[in-house]
């Protein structure tokens, strides 16, 4: 039997990448822990977690190493792959590449990443962790409760210090709020990927099994474009230019990141943002 090429109806259903962007918070792309990749069947945004222990793997930060690993596995996967099988493949590769490096590390030091992928022909979105995605009619922002708690605690301290007269520039240079929450950031892996956890349980790729209920999946309509992004964007729009414009305005208003879009870290002096950011848009072929 001669294989049927992906033309006509299938080709019209497929999604194609129309915008792709990634930038480091420092302004130096070598520091970036976000990865965007377009593969034959799947495309992905992977966000490596900021490592608070200073671990490096093969010359890369721990977060970047895992983000690259995730992107490699996702873009090598075939259309129609079940979401749970995709995560299993990622964890198998994690063990193969990083097992010897991470064997003796405590959970809080495990290199970690999150991701959002789209099956371009199957028109499915698969997500593990706090990345974001949207279409013109629906938005699923990332975020986890433990980060929101930490961000609000940090904001409360910095607001109090500002009220006492501490200069804004001093808090940007030496962030006591970040130091205050650092012990929690280093221990929150204890509630990551727990099969039966508290309200603080969240998902991430760290070599341990990801509970089924934390592997998310959605189906797209035939005519829906879709945007995937890391959490470096406080608001997600369908156009990259609008995401960038909103981020720039919000950074100008609140470089400490203690206002409407409070986070666990500020935009440090000399940096261009508070976090790495990645954006990927896909549109229906021929649309």
Image (cartoon, rainbow, N blue to C red):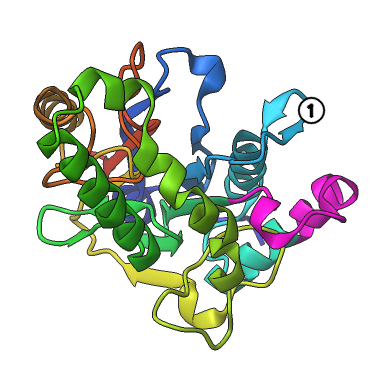
Picture coordinates of residue 33, whole percent (x, y): 52, 32
| Residue 19 can be seen, yes or no | yes
Q: Is residue 16 above or below residue 269?
A: below
Picture coordinates of residue 124, whole percent (x, y): 38, 63
The quarter holding residue 104 reads bottom right
Residue 80 lies left or right of residue 241; in this view the side is: right
Give the SS element for disc 1: loop
Query: For the view shown, which residue lies furthest in the right direction?
Result: 100
Picture coordinates of residue 113, whole percent (x, y): 56, 49
Q: Residue at x 42, y 55 (%)?
A: 121
User: Magenta span has 38?
Assistant: no
Q: Residue at x 50, y 44 (%)?
A: 46
Q: Is residue 269 above or below residue 171?
A: above
Question: The magenta stretch spans which residues?
Answer: 92-112
Q: Nearer the viewer, residue 207 or 89?
A: 207
Q: Quadrant of the C terminus?
A: top left
- Residue hosting label 1: 58
Q: Nearer the viewer, residue 223 or 139?
A: 139
Q: Nearer the viewer, residue 125 or 184?
A: 184
| Residue 143 can be seen, yes or no | no
Query: For the view shown, which residue lies furthest in the bottom direction?
Result: 196
Q: Nearer the viewer, residue 181 or 29?
A: 181
Q: Residue at x 67, y 62 (%)?
A: 1
Picture coordinates of residue 110, whole percent (x, y): 69, 53
Q: Residue at x 32, y 38 (%)?
A: 232
* Number of marks present in the image shown: 1
Q: Is residue 125 above or below residue 162?
A: below
Q: Is residue 34 above or below residue 7?
A: above
The quarter holding residue 187 reads bottom right
């Amino acid at each position: 039997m001669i294989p049927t090429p992906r033309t006509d109806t299938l080709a019209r259903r497929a999604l194609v990448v129309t915008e792709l962007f990634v930038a480091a918070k420092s302004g130096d792309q070598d520091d970036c822990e976000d990865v965007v990749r377009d593969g034959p069947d799947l495309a992905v945004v992977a966000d490596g977690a900021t490592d608070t222990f200073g671990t490096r793997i093969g010359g890369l930060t721990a977060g970047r190493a895992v983000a690259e690993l995730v992107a490699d596995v996702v873009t090598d996967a075939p259309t129609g792959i079940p979401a749970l099988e995709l995560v299993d493949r990622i964890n198998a590769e994690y063990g193969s590449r990083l097992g010897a490096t991470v064997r003796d590390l405590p959970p809080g030091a495990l290199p970690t990443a999150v991701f959002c992928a789209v099956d371009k022909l199957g028109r499915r979105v698969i997500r593990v962790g706090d990345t974001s995605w949207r279409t013109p009619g629906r938005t699923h922002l990332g975020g986890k409760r433990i980060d929101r708690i930490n961000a609000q605690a940090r904001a409360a301290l910095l607001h109090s210090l500002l009220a006492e007269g501490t200069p804004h520039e001093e808090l940007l240079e030496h962030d006591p709020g970040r130091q205050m929450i650092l012990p929690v950031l280093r221990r929150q892996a204890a509630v990551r990927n727990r099969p039966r956890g508290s309200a603080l349980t969240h998902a991430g790729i760290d070599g341990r099994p990801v509970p089924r209920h934390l592997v998310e999946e959605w189906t797209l309509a035939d005519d829906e474009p879709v945007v995937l992004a890391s959490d470096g964007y406080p608001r997600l729009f369908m156009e990259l230019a609008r995401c960038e414009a909103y981020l720039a305005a919000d950074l100008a208003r609140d470089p400490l990141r203690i206002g409407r879009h409070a986070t666990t870290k500020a935009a440090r002096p000399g940096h261009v943002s508070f976090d790495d950011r990645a954006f990927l848009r896909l549109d229906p072929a021929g649309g």
